[in-house]
């Protein structure tokens, strides 16, 4: 669960035996998420580090340009991660 409300709802419907918390450095997350580019017409997703197109910035199948969603740009990703961290704190405390 991402929020305390989701965690509390989950606890009402099932009993958890195990909780796993992944601690990944902020910069690693930001870099990986910011490397995502898409082909808007098809929805194909590329990651410039782990699954790059054959030609930088160009869709492999159509030859059309790839775009980076506004929420995948580094500044937006950083803001999303800060917001997530704030929301996740009470969830992590609940399951400690």
Image (cartoon, rainbow, N blue to C red):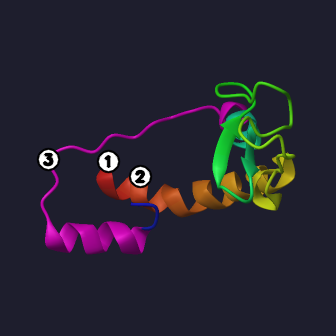
Seen at 66% across and 37% down, the residue is: 29
Q: Rounded to the nearest whole Å, what is the CA distance between mark 3 and mark 1?
A: 12 Å
User: Do the CB atoms of the residues marked 1 and 2 lie less than 8 Å apart?
Assistant: yes
Residue 27 drawn in magenta: yes
Compared across the picture, whether 78 is left or right of 9 comes to right
Residue 83 in the image: state x and y as whole percent.
66, 61
User: Do the CB atoms of the residues marked 2 and 3 lie less than 8 Å apart?
Assistant: no
* Of pointers 3 and 1, the one earlier in the residue sequence: 3
Q: Rounded to the nearest whole Å, what is the CA distance between mark 2 and mark 3?
A: 15 Å
Which is nearer the eye, 23 or 38? 38
Tell me where residue 91 sits by quadrant.
bottom left
Compared across the picture, whether 44 is left or right of 73 comes to left
Residue 18 in the image: state x and y as whole percent.
20, 43
Magenta-drawn segment: 4-29
| Quadrant including the N terminus | bottom left
Q: Which residue is mark 1?
A: 96
Label 1 CA crowd tier, 10 Å (few <14, some 14–19, many 20+): few
Seen at 77% across and 44% down, the residue is: 62
Label annotation for residue 92: 2
Residue sticking out furthest to the front: 62
């Amino acid at each position: 669960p991402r929020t305390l409300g989701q965690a509390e709802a989950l606890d009402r419907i099932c009993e958890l035996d195990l909780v796993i918390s992944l601690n990944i450095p902020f910069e690693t997350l930001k870099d990986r998420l910011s490397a995502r580019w898409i082909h808007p017409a098809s929805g194909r997703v590329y990651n410039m580090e782990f699954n790059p197109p054959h030609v930088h910035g160009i869709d492999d199948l159509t030859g059309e340009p790839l775009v980076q969603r506004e929420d995948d740009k580094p500044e937006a990703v950083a803001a999303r991660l800060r917001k997530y961290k704030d929301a996740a704190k009470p969830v992590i405390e609940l399951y400690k």
